[in-house]
Image: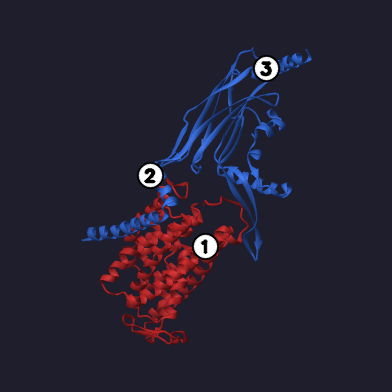
Chain colours: A red, B blue
Amino acid sequence: MQIYLPIAETSVNAFTLLGVGGGVGVLSGMFGVGGGFLITPLLFFIGVPPAVAVATGVNQVVASSISGVLAHLRRKTVDLRMGMVLLIGGLIGSMIGIWFFNLMQRMGQIDLVVQLAYVLFLGIIGALMLQEGWRALRRARSATPPRRKLHTHLWVHNLPLKMKFRASGLYISVFPPLLVGVGVGILAAIMGVGGGFILVPAMIYLLGMPTKVVIGTSLFQVTFVAAFTTMMHAITNHSVDVMLALFLIVGGALGAQIGTRIGMKLRAEELRILLALLVLAVCGKIALDLLLTPSELYSITIPGRF
Amino acid sequence: MRWLCMIIAMLLSSLPLRAEEAVVGLSQNRVSLTVNFEGSEILVFGAVRRETPLPDDSELDIVVAIEGPPLPAVIWRKERRLGIWVNTQSQEVRAAPSFYAVASTAPLSEILSPDADLTHRISTRLAIFEARGVDPADSAAFTEALIRIRESESLYQQRDGAVDLQRETLFSTRITLPKNITEGSYSARIFLLRDGDVIDEAETFIDVRKAVLERWLFNLAYDQPAIYGLLALALAVFFGWGAAALFRLLRH
């Protein structure tokens, strides 16, 4: 069954769409990630124009993180003050990202920018996760966990405008979280992702936040930045396709339920290695598209359309 | 007297041209892009009406050309830079039909003279208007690429021999509109050809429109983008939160 997408102005197979949403949902349930970084490239692969894929992907992120953020707010595992600082940074970053996105689109280079961003970030994150997962697996086998410091103070933490983040037990300058927020906001706008895959490691390793508030706070930031980015894309680009979003959201919600069950049966270290391999596979596929001689050297853009 | 002779001569020479006339019908003149639109097939049929006996010294040929709304376009060419393929050069096209299908009783080059093609702009190449002030030699590769890409997406079709002509009178052809067509008014032009020249032309229109819901969403997205954005967010919140709540309920 084909579904006509009113904004993308093309038809896509409904089951393919549900499959993409559902498949990514399974993975996001298994690994506890948003999955935006998989949805957007998969949409490219099935022929959705990049501008629509990015804007609709970010709309789907709102749906996949909303119930999580509500649960964390109820459990009070959100550092609201840190969340607000990250969010302010995120909104600034999102605006920068949207401006850059529209500029590149006018110059006919948006496909390249999005693909390069994916190759770069998926490559780095995948490699880091693989290394970390491998180490954790070996540590788990040797069964003597090394002691870790609560958090280390880096020079960035001592910049001016220090602020107390009680829920995180931190007293650091607002600049590091603000800049982390800006970075994630830019990625959200350009790549159509929530940015949790950058935000979570940055919060743990760069800001030194305790793990119990990391997930809730990152979901808080991601949800609002994604919502804001959706609005920005809708207003400046008219590229959010609600019909496409609906299928991804419904598929994703179903898939996440299955994924959570599977995730509970696997060990955390194995999960991390699996996710790392998956991220690297997507990265490799996009990199190949850029490196191999394309079968068609020409492409067409229609001004004002996708 | 000489003046009168000229008029008579003109009338006589033009008389055979008017002698055959195309009468055309379409299986549908309205295509609705609904949620489950998968493309559509349009039957173009008609008859040749003549008031004089059939001339036996030449063959009658028929060309059917369906054209979607013309839009400007930019064609990009990739080159390898630092190991990766990047869009480097571009060429603008003033107007290119978003859809163009030409069906004929025989290959166009055999039945249509270049002059007649130029006046009536029948072949795909002539339906594309290049930007003013570009070097034609340089732009040829870009225009050919435009045609090649759209042909691969079935947006441009050249179908020699696809028009069925019976007893030099009844003709019909089927044109497939693919799923990725743009909405707008599509023109269907029918040409009667003899000896490479167009002896009659008829035109009719097909209205391609998004269906009610799709139309509404599209208009909202462009006319009231803020409200559309809020609608997208409301749907995301409702379905994202709703689905999670539903599954929680089912588990207990």
> Circle 1 marks a residue in which chain?
A
Seen at 58% across and 44% down, the residue is B150
Q: Left or right: where does residue A152 sit relative to residue A124?
A: left
Query: Residue B245 in the image: x percent, y percent?
Result: 26, 60
Looking at numbered disc 3 in the image, what kind of residue is underneath it? Pro
Query: Residue B134 in the image: x percent, y percent?
Result: 70, 49
> Circle 2 marks a residue in which chain?
B
| Disc 3 to disc 1, C-alpha distance | 61 Å
Q: What residue sits right under mark 3 in the picture?
A: B16
Q: Is residue A92 above or below residue B128?
A: below
Q: What residue sits right under mark 1 in the picture?
A: A101
Label 2 packing within 10 angstroms: few (<14), some (14-19), many (20+): few
User: Is disc 3 placed on a helix, strand or loop?
Assistant: helix
Residue B69 picture quarter: top right
Q: Left or right: where does residue A285 sit relative to residue B198?
A: left
Query: Residue B194 in the image: x percent, y percent?
Result: 68, 23
In which quadrant will I find the N terminus of chain A? top left
Are discs 1 and 2 located on one and the same chain?
no
> Circle 3 marks a residue in which chain?
B
Q: Left or right: where does residue B192 sit relative to residue B248?
A: right
| Disc 1 to disc 2, C-alpha distance | 29 Å
Q: Is residue A15 above or below residue B195?
A: below
Looking at numbered disc 2 in the image, what kind of residue is underneath it? Leu
Seen at 65% across and 66% down, the residue is B82
Seen at 56% across and 42% down, the residue is B98
Looking at numbered disc 1 in the image, what kind of residue is underneath it? Phe
